[in-house]
Amino acid sequence: MDGSLRTRIKVCGITRLEDALAASQLGIDAIGFVFYDKSPRFIEPMKAAAIIRELPPFVSAVGLFVNPKQGLIDDVLNLCPLGVVQLHGDESPDFCQAQSRRVIKAIAVNSAEDLECAQQYRCSILLDAKAPKGVYGGNGKSFDWSLLRHFQHDYPLILAGGLNVKNVALALSHRQWFALDVSSGVETGAGIKDADKMRAFMACLQSAE
């Protein structure tokens, strides 16, 4: 990979202030908050807003939604100063384009055919493992990353799904990523991040780069 380019890191599923601050101190670029109430990492918007207010400058706050009504996104944005909206369901390209914030569109991948729909979206793409029907991300599983070795998109590519200290170097060996998105790989329980695991993940990333 091109050593002149730095891979950015997002830690998703933050539910506690101490975890957000620990991530920020380790140089993590973005903190993700899950506003999907069926997720074990769901956080109330008011609680997320309180955490975001304590973040240091230059750390992005990302809000994750799954098949939301526009009203839900607007309500959350009225409370939370999010810089980015991550859409993890079956949202259309038009819905993504209509957002007032920058958008990351998640694409569930199990085969090369799953990548074809990504070209419809004029925004950053997050590639995650395809979960069972009715489940949207957050299952700690990875997919065959070799499918992506030659995949091209006009916008930044983000890899998610089962990332941890054991496979981060392998993920980087496949291609240059704009960012990696980690959640369960740095947890002791759903939504409970571990500072030592985050530190080890960052060390492995830096070593691989």
Image (cartoon, rainbow, N blue to C red):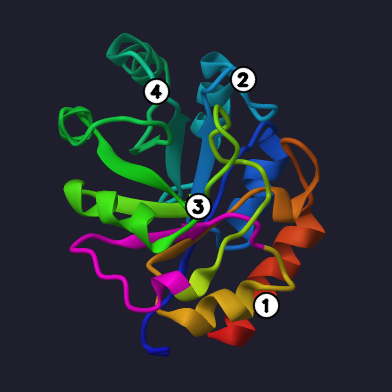
Q: Read off the magenta span.
A: 147-163
Q: Which residue is mark 1?
A: 204
Horizontal side of residue 22 vs 188, given as left or right:
left
Count of number-bearing discs:
4
At 67% across and 77% down in the image, what residue appears?
Answer: 204
Q: Which quadrant: the N terminus? A: bottom left
Q: Is residue 22 left or right of residue 79?
A: right
Label 2 to label 3: alpha-carbon separation:
18 Å
Q: Which mark is residue 128?
A: 3
Q: Is residue 152 above or below residue 132?
A: below
The residue wearing badge 4 is 67
Question: In this rendering, is residue 115 above or below 80?
Answer: below
Question: Alpha carbon of mark 4 to alpha carbon of mark 1: how far?
Answer: 34 Å
Q: Are marks 1 and 2 in contact (CB under 8 Å)?
A: no
The quadrant holding residue 167 is: bottom right
Which percent across, then down, holds residue 156? Answer: 29, 61
What SS does tag 4 mark?
A: loop
Nearer-the-camera pick, 127 or 168: 127
